[in-house]
Amino acid sequence: MTAVTVIGLGIMGGPMAANLVKAGFDVTGFNRSKAKVDQLVEQGGRGATGIADAVREADVVITMLPDSPDVEDVVLGADGILAHAPTGSLWIDASTIRPDVSVRLAEAAAAQGLRAVDAPVSGGESGAIEASLSIMVGGGAAEFEAARPVLEAVGSTVVHVGPAGSGQTVKAANQLIVAGTIELVAEAIVFLEAHGVDTEAAVKVLAGGLAGNRILDRKAAGMRARTFQPGFRIDLHHKDMGIVTAAAREAGVAIPLGAAAAQLMGAARAQGHGNLDHSALLLIVEQLSGRTNR
Ligand code: NAD
């Protein structure tokens, strides 16, 4: 039985680890807060007391951590993956981090005799729970084939997109599209409300035409009701807009609408909404429109 360790059992890593248990893998989990580890144990996994303990006997190690510095610490630290995972084991980074950091860490892993792929995911909390994530994988062809059975237990679309770091570049494009779409859906809802239109009926018909999209399907009801429980936190999408704007600048590509969406995401964070779902961009549209005290 393949031994899989998951480090980072948050909104995404928790359900992914549970699905790996259901798929028959021998799963060990570690998280900074112990409650998440206890939850995995209740679901049939094993708990670890630290990273070294978690990875020592792993065939595959998955990291699902917030940001580039978190992944760097967990991979390169004295108590970390490279120092303690067995030679030949496979490290899958499912976190969304900077492509350049991803490339550098993959090289460090190879120098230590580990195989590595970057495999960021899209599909949100519901995709993680339903094991229907879309997973964009960067790395060598052999590493991709080795990672595939594990990734297919947590996702329904698993695609090799190129060498190390490419998964992260594709994920940055994903976050650009999602942020821009949320902003336009939020603007449409506030616009419709200002005109006294029944937004439930409006969303229904919009979803059936060319304006139809997943944000309308999954987020519009929460936006209309002003319920912004995450989901995907504004803080994390702000991090991702930093990644995509820096990567676009590096490539000399103009992303004017993406840059505006990045500014609005930053404003949402500055207004204290960092822990709300990214659909809370709507609050900024309301604020800019002078419609906060309706
Ligand atoms: P989260 O904050 O819910 O989970 C991260 C977990 O990592 C937390 O439980 C935290 O305690 C743990 N952690 C942090 N540092 C640690 C360390 N050094 N050792 C052990 N555990 C540590 O975040 P999330 O929403 O699950 O997102 C994780 C990653 O996936 C992020 O990069 C995010 O951008 C990406 N992502 C999230 C979503 C989403 O909808 N939530 C969707 C796709 C991708």
Image (tube, rainbow, N blue to C red):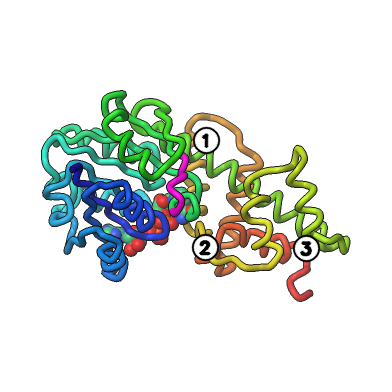
Q: Position of residue 21 (x, y in %)?
A: 29, 52
Give the residue type at disc 2: Pro
Q: Label 2 CB, ligand 1: below 8 Å?
A: yes
Q: Residue at x 55, y 66 (%)?
A: 229
Return the mark for residue 230. 2
Q: Position of residue 85 (x, y in %)?
A: 14, 45
The crowding category of the residue bearing disc 2, from other C-alpha atoms within 10 Å (few below 14, some 14 to 19, many at least 20), is some
Q: Earlier in the sequence, mark 2 or mark 1?
A: 2
Element under disc 1: helix
User: What residue range appears in magenta?
Assistant: 129-134
Give the residue type at disc 1: Ala
User: The N terminus is located in which quarter?
Assistant: top left
Of residues 48 and 276, the one nearer the viewer is 48
Give the residue type at disc 3: Ser
Q: Is residue 141 visible?
A: yes
Q: Quadrant of residue 147?
A: top left
> Mark 3 — residue?
289
Q: Residue at x 24, y 59 (%)?
A: 30
> Mark 1 — residue?
248
Q: Position of residue 198 (x, y in %)?
A: 83, 61
Q: Is residue 148 magenta?
A: no
Q: Is residue 131 magenta?
A: yes
* Left or right of 280 on screen, residue 239: left
Instruction: Answer above or below: position of 108 versus 227.
Output: above
Q: Position of residue 195 (x, y in %)?
A: 88, 61
Q: Quadrant of residue 8?
A: bottom left
